[in-house]
Every structure is written in structure tokens, then in C-alpha cells.
Amino acid sequence: MGAEDRAGGSIEDRLASLAQRLDEVETQLAFQDDLHRRLDETVARQDREILELKRQLRALAERMAELRDAGAAATGSPADEVPPHY
């Protein structure tokens, strides 16, 4: 029994198989690198959007509080208000 039979094929065949597997791994790595880059960009964009939405929410809450305070000062207690149909 020769070395070729024990090892499962000729050295050239094994090297070709390893080279093919290496190419496949490199292709997968390139795909994953691109995916990772795109996901990083998406997360960064979403973080900016969340910060802007929080800012807008705070501004709206402040504005609503101002309007509520201004309405309460002008009309008094809501219990003293006459319904609009009277």
C-alpha cells in the first residue's frame, strides 16, 4: 500500500481540495466583512435617528406642559369649566 492510498489521494489532489476550501472560506469572509460593515452603518444611522426622536419627544413634552400650564392659568380648574354644549 503506497502513501497515496493511505492519505486518500495524491498530494496534488489534496492541495487542490485545500485550495478550493480556502477560496470558499475567503469568499465567505469577504461576504461577512461586507455584511458587518453594512450592519455597523445601519446601527449608527438608527442611533442618530433615536437621538433625534428623543430630542423631538422632549420638545413636544415641554410644549404640552407649557400649553397645559397656560390653559390652566387662563381658565382656572377644569372642574369649573362649562361643557361646550351649554
Image (cartoon, rainbow, N blue to C red):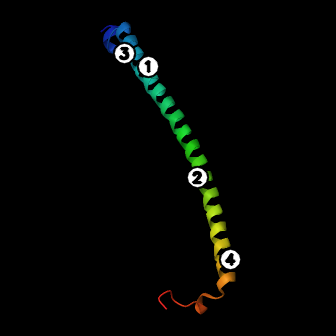
How far from the left and from the top, in percent, is residue 25? 44, 24
Spatial CA distance of label 1 from label 3 is 9 Å
Q: Is residue 42 above or below residue 15?
A: below
| Mark with earlier residue (2, 3) | 3
Q: Is residue 64 left or right of residue 18?
A: right
Q: Say which of 31 and 13 sits in front.
A: 31
How far from the left and from the top, in percent, is residue 48? 61, 47
Spatial CA distance of label 2 from label 1 is 41 Å
Spatial CA distance of label 4 from label 2 is 30 Å
Query: Do labels 2 and 3 touch, CB within 8 Å?
Result: no
Look at discs 4 and 3 and give the one toward the viewer.
Answer: 4
Query: Do labels 2 and 1 touch, CB within 8 Å?
Result: no
Spatial CA distance of label 2 from label 3 is 49 Å
Mark sitting on residue 70: 4
Q: Say which of 46 and 9 sits in front.
A: 46
The local crowd at label 3, few if under 14, some if 14 to 19, many if 20 or more residues have their Cα within 10 Å, is: few
Look at discs 1 and 3 and give the one toward the viewer.
Answer: 1
The local crowd at label 2, few if under 14, some if 14 to 19, many if 20 or more residues have their Cα within 10 Å, is: few
How far from the left and from the top, in percent, is residue 9? 32, 11
The residue pinned by badge 2 equals 50
The residue pinned by badge 1 equals 22
The three-letter amino acid code for the residue at tag 1 is Leu
The three-letter amino acid code for the residue at tag 4 is Ala
Q: Is residue 7 above or below residue 65?
A: above
Which secondary structure lies at badge 1? helix
Mark sitting on residue 17: 3
